[in-house]
Image (tube, rainbow, N blue to C red):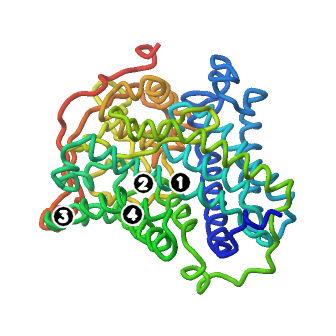
Amino acid sequence: MWQWLSAPDYWSARLVVSHLLALGYLIGFVCFLRQFRGLLGSRGMTPIADHVERVPFKRSPSLFHLRSSDRWLTAAGWTGVVASLLAQVADFAPLWAWPLLWGLLWVLYLSIVNVGQIWYSFGWESLLLEAGFLAIFLGPAHLAPPAPVLWLLCWLLFRVEFGAGLIKLRGDSCWRDLTALHYHHETQPMPGPLSRWFHRIPRPLHKVEVLANHATQLVVPFLLFAPQPAAGIAGLIIVITQLWLMLSGNFAWLNFITIALAFAGMGSWLLDPVTPAPPPLQDSPAWFAVPVLVVTALFVVLAWWPIQNMLGSAQVMNRSFNKLHLGNTYGAFGSITRTRYEVIVEGAAGPHGPWLEYEFKGKPGDPHRRPPQVAPYHLRLDWLMWFLAISPSYGRSWLPGFLEALLRNEPEVLKLLRDNPFPDEPPKLVRADLYRYRFNTRSERKTTGRHWTRTKTSEFIRPLGLEDLR
């Protein structure tokens, strides 16, 4: 009866998508476990316990409204890690276990995002949640993948790519005159080891990059809904483009999840040669097929908001229209900063110094240090330091707590940094200055050994002690 719902030719696509999404969840939960104490824990900069007291459940649905102790948060994180690992072998599970396992992953991560405050305000959080929700209805290996779920995954990928392409054309003239990459590789939030090389390639090639980006984001996504082989070729182009972006910078798991989605449009002709042979496939039973159709109808309704946003004149990036983070709109880099500024934080044992710099794990600091490869891991504090350099308003909720943690040598917050220049006793004063950074040329790099040249432009935060913060 439900044979028409099945898409057996996309069994390999389902296999790849589900395994990559499980890995995406694993990365997300590991990031949470390694960082939440300094960000959201009881001694963190913006404790979850304070947040759930201010914000009711209906505005931030989360399991942590029940309990929000560090022990409870740790248990939830480790449960997510175990469930992510189990999802890698869930192909062999009975059909009833699949939605339970993937539903658990979605509920746990939704609970984190909804109380994660500014630390979890990035578009790839919603992307992981929406993709992870759809994975609940993909089913294990012995089930022929439901075609509507694959369409919805392609629709999600379409919104990611087409939304990003539109916001670029509308948001900044440098995307229209093809000069965006004269700046972007140098000024992006988290440069990687090869970013300086990308920045220094000839400018005509930068224009080719921009043209290729426009084609990939504004034309190729429509081919995802075309018959094979066009849909598979479109997915392959998107994968290649995302790998290029992963080489040129660190964008957490945005590129990784986008690649996972791109496989949803690839047919057997493309994936069967590199994936195992499928077992004998069964069609969806009624108890599974009916929820698939209900979810499909739900996403048809939810499509109104992102379509309205993309076609409207006031398009916004990375917006969730509901607290379940389903049917979101996406986009990135609607505006490009032309000059890179960094907030450099220092501490001193007294008013006369010496002032010692705090080094972060990913963001530029020491000019001699090569930008590290971080993605698909996500350094949340480092990213917000980039936003802070754009506008101090981005630090309103967390910056005072960060400075106080430095003045107290709070160990959980200091773990978020690369090193602590005051290991024995905390500094008496902290301050921050704003510096302009630019990549060195090859000759400058050879002469000085530095990857960056930096110049102080202004005082960002005057020297402060604990009494000043109070």
Crowding at dot 1, Cα within 10 Å, few <14 / some 14-19 / many 20+, comes out as many
Residue 55 pos. (x, y %)? 63, 19
Name the residue carrying label 1.
155
User: CA–CA distance between discs 4 and 2?
Assistant: 9 Å
Q: Mark 3 is on which residue type?
A: Arg
Crowding at dot 3, Cα within 10 Å, few <14 / some 14-19 / many 20+, comes out as some
User: CA–CA distance between discs 1 and 4?
Assistant: 13 Å
User: CA–CA distance between discs 3 and 2?
Assistant: 26 Å
Q: Is residue 175 above or below residue 14?
A: above
Name the residue carrying label 2.
161
Task: Mark 3 vs mark 4: give the one in front.
Answer: 4
Find out whether the residues at labels 1 and 4 contact each other: C-beta distance under 8 Å: no
Find out whether the residues at labels 3 and 4 contact each other: C-beta distance under 8 Å: no
* Numbered circles on residues, count: 4
Q: Mark 2 is on which residue type?
A: Glu
Q: Earlier in the sequence, mark 4 or mark 2?
A: 2
Q: Nearer the viewer, residue 360 or 107?
A: 107
Q: Earlier in the sequence, mark 2 or mark 1?
A: 1
Name the residue carrying label 3.
200
Q: Mark 4 is on which residue type?
A: Val
Q: Earlier in the sequence, mark 3 or mark 4?
A: 3
Q: Nearer the viewer, residue 430 or 260?
A: 260
Task: Mark 3 vs mark 2: give the one in front.
Answer: 2
The residue positioned 31% from the left and 25% from the top of the image is 461
The residue positioned 58% from the left and 50% from the top of the image is 128
What is the number of the mark on residue 220?
A: 4
The residue positioned 23% from the left and 27% from the top of the image is 459
Q: Mark 1 is on which residue type?
A: Trp
The residue positioned 75% from the left and 70% from the top of the image is 144
Q: Earlier in the sequence, mark 3 or mark 2?
A: 2
Q: Earlier in the sequence, mark 1 or mark 4?
A: 1
